[in-house]
Amino acid sequence: MIDVDVSQRPLQRILWKGDVNEPVKVYQLNTVTYGTASAPFLAMRTLKQISIDEGENFPLAASVLCDDFYMDDVLSGANSLEVAKTLQHQLIDILQTAQMSLHKWCGNTSELIPTTEKEYDFASPEEIKTLGIAWKSKTDCFNFKVEVERNAHPTKRSVLSIIARLFDPLGLLGPVITKAKIFMQQLWTLQIDWSERLPEKEASEWKEFVRSLVALNGINIERCIVIPNAEVIELHGFCDASERAYGAAIYARSINPDGEIKVKLVASKSRVSPVKQVTMPRLELCSAVLLAKLMHKVKRALRMDITSVFFWTDSTIVLSWMKNESRNLKTFVANRVVIIQELTELNKWHHVPSNKILLISFQEDLIQRKFNEVNCGGLGLLSSKCLQ
């Protein structure tokens, strides 16, 4: 439904013939065509222009067009059913001004799924998949679908292919993804060719890991991270490091007027430690930088009234570095301390004793755990029970 400017249409000419014996015909595509390099930008830019042109008439929908559209999918919501209904109607009306029709609605309540509209083809699947993550609308939970073909003779190429399929943008499967990253790093140190079979030890280890991945299909993660009618919403970020990897995780702790508390994992991030040996304090510092960056992104993405933010680390050395002027520190440390000081307030950083940290072991049985029972998402994360 998006026309291309007349002056640009000659750039979208194609050759076509219906049969081998027919002459070649030249066609000119007059609309934005999926598959061209410019199509994603043009589609999103058009939605943004619609929000600019019609923003005064549809204020709720205008912000959603700018922030909550992913190509032709819209993922959004509201704090109440009334606002959600209003948003839904505004989205339909604002896109109709451009002759675009929304269809295949899915929501966690049946009242948001129209059944009498004649102009739209509405649908309500029990499970939909967007950006690699499946969402069960009835239970309002995220789940993962992992289908991996077992290779009798794994190579570095096949290993990387399987790792690439474990798409986890929020880091909800942090321990699993990190284990895979560590294994891939081991292959690099062995200097194995892409098509070369893995040595027997590594091949056996990888096959066992792949067999364990089926356990991910039984994991269900609650989508809502705050308690209803929350009057206090806190973000608690934790960072930790080991010799093989370091990571950060953020939890939301919400409290309602009755004093009920809910703690949920929001996001996590992990990195494999460099092959060249780095001291533990420096790795702890790297995890603190990772947490600072992750918290900055999470606060901007949540668009909620956050009551307070807390950063936790078990490294007293890192806390000491943060309080120093960067010019008094060595280059490696100074560069990272500056990032932390720019992205966070130093008085928000706190020390947590190591015996309060849930050190996550990267063993095969970890994959078998139910992530909704052990609320973890990376390395050295604080158990949700500690926040209660």
Image: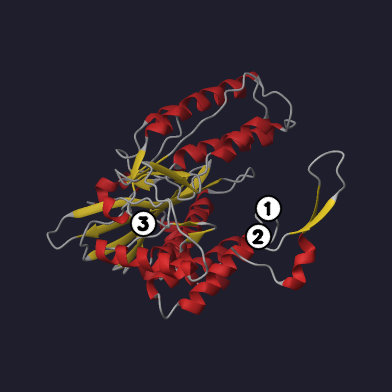
Q: Residues within 10 Å of mark 1 (few under 14, many from 20)?
A: few
Question: Which mark, residue 117?
Answer: 3
Label 1 vs label 3: CA separation? Answer: 31 Å
Q: Amino acid at mark 1?
A: Gly
- In depth, the one of 251 and 144 nearer the eye is 144
Q: Residue at x 49, y 45 (%)?
A: 168
- In depth, the one of 174 and 330 nearer the eye is 174
What residue does disc 2 label?
39
**SS state under label 3:** loop
- In depth, the one of 74 and 312 nearer the eye is 74
**SS state under label 2:** helix
Q: Residue at x 49, y 50 (%)?
A: 169
- Earlier in the chain: of badge 1 and badge 3, it is 1
Label 2 vs label 1: CA separation? Answer: 7 Å
Question: Which mark, residue 35?
Answer: 1
Compared with 275, 194 (above or below) is above
- In depth, the one of 287 and 68 nearer the eye is 68
